[in-house]
Amino acid sequence: MARNAADASAPAPSVPELTLRAILLGGAITLVFTAANVYLGLKVGLTFATSIPAAVISMAVLRMFRNSSILENNIVQTVASAAGTLAAIIFVLPGLVMIGWWQGFPYWTTALITLTGGLLGVLFSVPLRRALIVDTPDLPYPEGKAAAEVLRVGSESREGAEESALGLKVLVVNSIASAAFAALTQTKLVVAEAATWFRVGGGATGISGGLSYALMGVGHLVGISVGMAMALGLVIGWWILLPILTAQQPMAADAATWAQSVFTANVRFFGAGVIGVAAVWTLLKIAGPVLGGIRSAMAASRARDRGELLAIGERDMPIAAVALGTLALLVPIALILWSTIAGGPLQGSAVLLIGGALVFVLVIGLMIAAVCGYMAGLIGASNSPISGVGILAVVAASLMLVGLFGRESGGATTQALVAYALIVTGIVFGVATISNDNLQDLKTGQLVGATPWRQQVALLFGVVFGSIVVPPVLNLLGSQLGFAGMPGAGPNALAAPQAALISALARGVLGGDLNWTMIGYGAAAGVALVILDEALGKAKLLRLPPLGVGIGIYLPMAVILPTVTGSIIGWFYDRWAAKRSNPEFAIRLGTLTATGLIVGESLWGVAFAGLVAGAGSDAPIEVTGLLGLGDGYGPVALAGGTILFFALAWWLYRRTMKIVG
């Protein structure tokens, strides 16, 4: 079998890789990061990416061991990446408490839902690695590449390489600047988001840009094609759809509240329709590579059985073990499903419901794993609209129940159906989130010469560690603070916005009142966007991936705009770098510049999560009140923050260009 470039330069097998200390260190980081992400996700609906912070921590710790290696550090970040990933289960499971099905979070049921979905995600990612990494080299995998650069520059600078020493300086300076600005926004002395809202015609819209260096760095790494696709989605969602829809739904509230409420209730469903069609088209496009990946994995297993020595990049977990593991996981999943309906109004249809759900988990789970892996490769795991995938999954699960059971207006039966849909969605969501993140890790591994099967085993450990800590943290937060909208929720109740939306969607489908109109319009637009992208490809023009357009419609403008800006900055920088005497070095320093922007804000996200949890406040370092700065300071924070953000970005890129020369 062919050995790729990463295989050829891979370190010798004697280099430490899957070691006990790497597993334990990764596990410790996972436990802490998972707890922090569960809290932040329930509080504000966002989680932070953990791979890069874990890589930085790992390098700092393992430097104390003389024989530590880049591959060992890669295993640590691989294990720890499960933290941000598995915490996303909070976007589904609190819905069971909100509808009154659970009074708390039963430990073993919650852990098993998280564990089984996560393990399936790891197993599904084995053939997908070949399809979406080995056989699809053009996917950018921004966070995977960023993590690889962090690991490389740390390892090579330790060995004294001059270029890597320069790269490390760029990485460190940009990380400090990014973290410092992110911390400054939390003091409220400058804003984290620059936004203005206004009425236009009979409707309303606005311009909103998050002042986030991490998003700018991701934009640089994903490239101009994806950036322009997201820009097109932004234009469609915010400056075409939103003014029309707000004009059709007049509201007495201010322009900001009006626009944002209509965006959430209508535009996002339009975006979900586009994502749905783009996802189906993506599946059709990658079906060949996925099947080829499975065939390649089977061929590698046969070669291994014959005693042939495989190249490092071919050494995946045996496909037979993947198949057996997948089938074995169906047993605990069936037990979870049975425990949900036993003794209730659905028990008489248990065989039909459980059988249908198992097929659903296997088929839809694999499809969603493929789509999420592709999305992660396209725009990165942090920017991937995983809640949009959750919307499609819960709608599909609810439609499956309608097909198997029909719609029921009875309170107890409807509640049981909604709960069943949420639990099935929770398992599939675990598959989606893990595959969304795992392929970034496996891309990092490919770039640093890691052994795939060792990374895949490390991912299994990460899922186990994460599943251990999710239930007690959910129980603690649910019992002490509660969730908005549930009976007895206090003034400090956690919003859990995605869980509220997904549970409402399940009720909507099973009750027949879902916003199908906007989903249908979005699907029609998705077909048109697929045709446009294919036409651009045939004309050899800049392509606009329809999934990127759908993401641009679905996600808030504050997330999209800095990502688009970063893609434009990266395009100009790469054009400049290509004309240097050493273009490879110039482009690599540009990558490290963007990576530093991601690293700094990511590390600050970890620290801030700890501050929030310790202080019991979502603004633990705000100082405007202490300084006596009232409402009149708002325009200063807005203008000053925006100017500082772009001035600092200009200085950081200019500094890199001077180093290149």
Image (cartoon, rainbow, N blue to C red):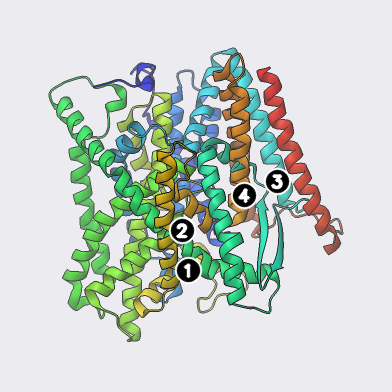
Real-space Cα distance between discs 4 and 1?
24 Å
Question: Badge 1: few (under 14), some or many (20 or more) residues near its Cα, within 10 Å?
Answer: some
CB atoms of marks 3 and 4 within 8 Å: no
Report the residue marked by disc 3. 183
The mark that comes first in sequence, 1 or 3, is 3
Report the residue marked by disc 1. 501
Disc 2 is placed on an element classified as helix
CB atoms of marks 2 and 1 within 8 Å: yes
Report the residue marked by disc 4. 561
Disc 4 is placed on an element classified as helix
Residue 217 percent across, percent down from the top left:
59, 38
Choose between 654 and 625: the one closer to the eye: 654
Disc 1 is placed on an element classified as helix
**Residue at coordinates 40% horizontally, 30% vertically from top-left?**
445
Real-space Cα distance between discs 2 and 1?
9 Å
Real-space Cα distance between discs 2 and 4?
19 Å
User: What's under tag 1, amino acid-wise?
Assistant: Leu
The numbered dot on residue 387 is 2
Residue 104 percent across, percent down from the top left:
43, 69
User: What's under tag 3, amino acid-wise?
Assistant: Ala
Disc 3 is placed on an element classified as helix
